[in-house]
Image: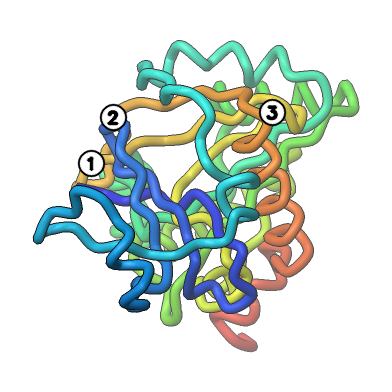
Amino acid sequence: MTLRFIGTTSVDGDFPTLYEVEGSTDILVQGVRVSNPEQLAQLRDVKQSETLVTVPRDLLVRFAPRAEPNPMVPFPEVANLFREFEHTAFRLETRRSYATDRNGARWRRWHAGEDISVEPANDWRRNVTDQTAQGKRFERVRLVDAPPTEGQRFLLATGLGNVAAGEDIRNLPRAEAERLGLPDFDFWLFDSRVLVRFVFDDQDTTLGVVVSEAPVEVLAACQARDAAWHHAIRTAEFQRQVHGPE
């Protein structure tokens, strides 16, 4: 089953670390295996299949979930947030491709060699323009592999159109994101208060979203946003770096 990174207190990103087993209530703990004979002798009812690890208390204080996970809901149930947020809407995109892109008409036109960077306004871009005209901010950081995948090249081709509508879209090399310890899942963060985490299947199709206002989860998302935004590169500049001088 898919693991979702929750958090770590390691400066290297190796261990100790907590993960959530997606679709369950289980938490996976990564730490140093217990090998001290005196400690092992004091343990109770240890099954042959079980392994004991040591983790610092700080890891559990900072990141251990304190409530049952919220249920997954269909994405349309959170559509109102894109109009009703007060200040900021931030998106972290981590996947190498999205089924919604591959199944769309723009994908086919892009494959046919058409320029899709400038297109008539759609519902998304009209809303972005309306909200940013009120002083609100739409911000997005996209992780990009080296070399970019087909899905990432498509997003680079469409990105400037969204930027023109009012989004501030930036790109971050995946190696840099891993160095920074950024999450490996997609989310929207509204007003640094409401976290909307995406759940995908193996074919990059959105199954739904999990909404949370839990302080520990929102704080982790805020920290990820700040780190990603600090190191990410604006779309136009990143395109020049990828494509080189023309």
**Which tag, 2 or 3, sits closer to the chain's start?**
3
Q: Which residue is mark 1?
A: 201
Q: Which residue is mark 3?
A: 190
- Graded by Cα atoms within 10 Å as few (under 14), some (14 to 19) or many (20 or more), the crowding at tag 1 reads few
- Graded by Cα atoms within 10 Å as few (under 14), some (14 to 19) or many (20 or more), the crowding at tag 3 reads many
Asked whether disc 2 touches disc 1, contact meaning CB atoms under 8 Å apart, the reply is yes
Q: Is residue 197 above or below residue 46?
A: above
The amino acid marked with disc number 3 is: Phe
**Which tag, 3 or 1, sits closer to the chain's start?**
3
The amino acid marked with disc number 2 is: Leu
Quadrant hosting residue 71: top left
Q: Position of residue 51 (x, y in %)?
A: 24, 63
**Which tag, 2 or 1, sits closer to the chain's start?**
1
**Residue located 64% across and 37% down the image:** 216
Quadrant hosting residue 30: bottom left
**Residue located 36% across and 44% down the image:** 27
- Graded by Cα atoms within 10 Å as few (under 14), some (14 to 19) or many (20 or more), the crowding at tag 2 reads few
The amino acid marked with disc number 1 is: Asp
From where the camera sits, is residue 105 visible? no
The one nearer the camera, 7 or 224, is 7
The one nearer the camera, 190 or 151, is 190
Horizontal side of 39 relative to 243 (left or right) equals: left
Quadrant hosting residue 170: bottom right
* Residue 207 numbered tag: 2
Horizontal side of 80 relative to 225 (left or right) equals: left
Secondary element under disc 3, as helix, strand or loop, is: strand
